[in-house]
Image (spheres, grey):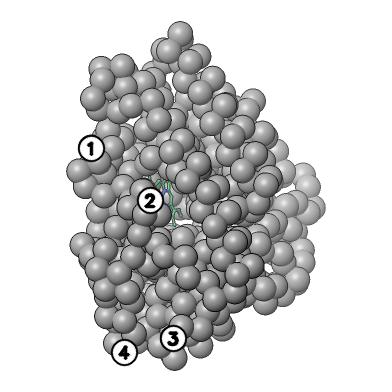
Amino acid sequence: TSKILELFDSDFISDPHPTLAKLREESPAHLVATPNGLKTWLVTRYEDAKALLTDPRVSKDMRVGYGLVPQNFADPEKQAHFQAQRGTRKQFATELSTTMLDSDPPDHTRLRKLVAKAFTMRQVEALRPRITELVTELLDAIEDRDEVDLMDALSFPVPFTVICWLLGVPPEDRDKFRRWSNLLTSGQGSEEALDASQDMVGYLRALIADKRENPADDMLTALIEATDEGEKLDEIELISMAFLLLVAGHETTVNLLNTGTLALLTNPDQRALLAADAGLWDSAIDEFLRIDAPLANATWRFTLEPIRLGDVLIPKGEFITISLSAAGRDPKRYTDPDRVDITRKNSGHLAFGHGIHHCIGAPLARLEGRIVLGELFRRFPRLSLATPKDELSWRPSFNLRGLASLPVRLR
Ligand code: HEM
């Protein structure tokens, strides 16, 4: 078990599932090296994944994690690389990673409470007319086209615009924000990603200063007010919160919209079911999340104590990565796991996580999925792929699973 697997190559990027299936079959956990040189235990079985997401013996706190994780790569070159990354990450950690996602209670509880109100089912449901209008406008804009990249036309603009509305980010900053966000999530640990993180911090600082001058009816202003009252949030937490919401608010949902569309374009039987019964959309969205979890291998934890999974003993002080991607296709949990079946009952998928860090944006992501996919297939009943499925390009990321683009024919 001390062998460190290097899974990340072009085959893994285009389809990680065969590799993950093999690992899941072999053993409950494998030591793997991530593309940026971190060593982590990849957990692939559904039951283990679910249990670990609520296990008090693991922590999310970066500060705890980096203090604990030993540096024991056998290869000195890798060790040096890891060391360098560790430095990078540490710097990254303070200004952009002081978030609820990177903390344990009581910090987690305090930070989450500050924004939880904004994401209740009722609050989110109130956005329905506005989101529908946005989607209608975007679809009107491509109505006369024969072919279009859905990523640019729809899947990116919708979640990104919505999270910008909520936080109060000016829409004209969209392009530079998208560039940084892409660099940060795909090019982890690279020089460019580090630059992007600095640019992002600078941008958020300026935006916050501007909101202080010109308070508005948005979430960022509300968070600034909580900061200025002291205690509730400090400046670094504020920047980190804005960053987390902006990035988490679109990176994942974009992938759901694209992979959901792809699932329907390649499974005509399922598409026909939806055309006949719009009541199936909610379970369809859950099925798309199960079949390709957007946060594929991104739920990180650190062991505070040794943890036994079957015959594997994970020592104290190591990284664990819970593969939501692999858990979603565990044959012990799902019959015929590689098949898209939008009528599946009690899916219980873990794509939004589980326990105290369960995705705060889940109601919003579901609503966006429902509106975007529903309207797209209603308006363009002849929609089809413009590139064969196996030639589509996927984003080169270990953490995320998502298409780089989605060229379609509209008629
Ligand atoms: C947490 C997935 C959309 C904000 C999480 C977690 C997952 C997840 C798996 C837990 C991570 C962990 O335990 O390590 C997704 C997916 C989405 C989505 C698949 C879309 C399909 C959104 C949206 C927002 C958002 C739209 C914001 C508007 C957050 C936040 C957390 C989180 C703030 C941290 C919660 C905490 O630590 O308590 N998400 N998410 N997510 N998500 Fe999402």
Q: Nearer the viewer, residue 340 or 171?
A: 171
Instruction: Measure the C-alpha gap from mark 4 to mark 2.
Output: 28 Å
Residue drawn at point x = 51 percent, y = 53 percent: 86
Q: Which residue is mark 3?
A: 1
Amino acid at the residue labelled 4 = Asp
Which callout, 1 or 3, points to the residue nearer the camera?
3
Q: Residues within 10 Å of mark 1 (few under 14, many from 20)?
A: few
Q: Which residue is mark 2?
A: 62
Q: Residues within 10 Å of mark 4 (few under 14, many from 20)?
A: few
> Which numbered disc, 4 or 1, marks the residue that appears first in the sequence?
1
Q: Residues within 10 Å of mark 3 (few under 14, many from 20)?
A: few
Residue 55 occupies which quadrant of the picture?
A: bottom left
**Which numbered dot is residue 110?**
1
Does residue 265 appear left or right of residue 308 in this picture?
right
Does residue 349 appear left or right of residue 144 in this picture?
left
Residue furthest out toward the top:
213
Relative image position of residue 115 (x, y in whole percent): 31, 35
Instruction: Measure the C-alpha gap from mark 1 to mark 3.
Output: 39 Å
Tell me the quadrant of the picture where the N terminus can be found: bottom left
> Which numbered disc, 1 or 3, marks the residue that appears first in the sequence?
3
Instruction: Measure the C-alpha gap from mark 2 to mark 3.
Output: 25 Å
Q: Nearer the viewer, residue 358 or 68?
A: 68
**Which numbered dot is residue 311?**
4
Residue drawn at point x = 47 percent, y = 65 percent: 71
Q: Nearer the viewer, residue 11 or 393?
A: 11
Residue 319 occupies which quadrant of the picture?
A: bottom left
**Label 2 secondary element:** helix
